[in-house]
């Protein structure tokens, strides 16, 4: 009997030690934030949809960013509920400059006040991830694969032989009052908190959360973020009017730390 038990005991210890080496969801998330902090450059695509009562806003942005120092270029398409046609423009941003031009042949750049430009993706992308850190003990995680995204050839998404990327899929869902700090940050990001007559204490007391979802896809080897998506849906009273806020965000990243071609685009 002893000859049987001893090998089994050794095997059990080996299995348990192997389980201990597996990364936890919060560790993967921390590594993703660290990798994002160290980004030198990246290509991105951002899709955003916002509905507030009868108002609707959709935007698609695609471009490249180089950090430290900041230099970014993007093409933007925006659609508002009360407009029959979308607005198409290009934007160029550095630490000192903000330019915009219509995405039309012969259009020229217009210089805007740099202090009026705020976008976390351009200036500090880790802010988007850090908002969920206080709830990292509630994260769920699994390993999966996603298709490599090619904006130049979207048919690759339907190709059975398309390149895949092994990722950690970390997710979070919340719907209780304890997640009001997330909603507060969301309201501030949308600029709703800037109204001079707004009492934010009253606003926060009125919030009823239906859902807050977050999913991030992190490369299993480099911990680079390939996708980050969120969904916020809640009711809030702003200036004596109840609003149902429903916003979805999808960010795709690729070409991490590879050379960018921003100069060619702004001179074109």
Image: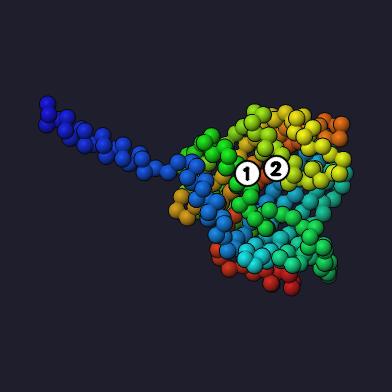
> Could you tell me which residue is drawn at 84 percent across and 39 percent down?
198
Measuring from the top left, give residue 214's x and y in whole percent. 61, 40
Name the quarter where the C terminus is drawn: bottom right
Measuring from the top left, give residue 224's x and y in whole percent. 52, 54
> Could you tell me which residue is drawn at 70 percent across and 42 percent down?
185
* Figure colour scheme: rainbow
Residue under label 1: 131
Residue 20 sits in quarter: top left
Residue 177 visible (yes or no): yes
> Could you tell me which residue is drawn at 14 percent across and 30 percent down?
4
Judge by depth and name the residue closer to the eye, 70 or 41. Answer: 70
Judge by depth and name the residue closer to the eye, 105 or 35. Answer: 35
Label 1 crowding class (10 Å Cα cut-off): few <14, some 14-19, many 20+?
few
Residue 11 sits in quarter: top left
Judge by depth and name the residue closer to the eye, 122 or 88. Answer: 122
As helix, strand or loop, the secondary structure at mark 1 comes to: loop
As helix, strand or loop, the secondary structure at mark 2 comes to: helix
Is 207 on the left or on the right of 161, as rendered? right
Is 208 on the left or on the right of 239, as rendered? left
- For the residues bearing labels 2 and 1, Cβ distance under 8 angstroms: yes
Label 2 crowding class (10 Å Cα cut-off): few <14, some 14-19, many 20+?
some
> Could you tell me which residue is drawn at 75 percent across and 33 percent down?
204
Measuring from the top left, give residue 74's x and y in whole percent. 71, 60
Reply above or below: 23 against 255: above
Measuring from the top left, give residue 257's x and y in whole percent. 55, 63
Residue under label 2: 185
* Cα distance between the residues tagged 2 and 1: 8 Å
Label for residue 34? none
Name the quarter where the N terminus is drawn: top left
Residue 61 sits in quarter: bottom right
Residue 105 visible (yes or no): no
């Amino acid at each position: 009997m002893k000859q049987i038990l001893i090998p089994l005991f050794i095997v059990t210890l080996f299995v348990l030690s192997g389980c201990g080496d597996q990364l936890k969801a919060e560790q993967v998330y921390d590594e993703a934030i660290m990798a994002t902090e160290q980004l030198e450059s990246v290509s991105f695509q951002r899709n955003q949809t916002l509905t507030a009562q009868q108002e609707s806003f959709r935007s698609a942005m695609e471009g490249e960013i180089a950090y430290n120092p900041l230099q970014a270029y993007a093409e933007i398409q925006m659609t508002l509920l009360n407009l029959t046609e979308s607005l198409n423009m290009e934007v160029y941003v550095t630490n000192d400059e903000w330019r915009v031009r219509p995405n039309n042949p012969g259009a020229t750049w217009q210089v805007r006040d740099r202090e009026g430009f705020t976008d976390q993706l351009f200036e500090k992308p880790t802010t988007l991830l850090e908002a969920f850190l206080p709830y990292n003990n509630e994260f769920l995680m699994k390993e999966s694969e996603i298709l490599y995204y090619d904006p130049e050839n979207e048919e690759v998404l339907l190709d059975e032989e398309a390149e895949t990327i092994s990722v950690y899929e970390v997710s979070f869902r919340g719907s209780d009052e304890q997640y009001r700090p997330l909603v507060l940050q969301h309201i501030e990001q949308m600029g709703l908190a800037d109204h001079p007559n707004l009492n934010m204490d009253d606003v926060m007391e009125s919030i009823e959360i239906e859902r807050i979802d977050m999913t991030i896809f992190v490369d299993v080897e480099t911990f680079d973020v390939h996708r980050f998506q969120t969904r916020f849906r809640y009711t809030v009273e702003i200036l004596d009017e109840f609003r149902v806020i429903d916003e979805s965000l999808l960010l795709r990243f690729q070409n991490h730390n590879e050379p960018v071609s921003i100069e060619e685009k702004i001179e074109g």
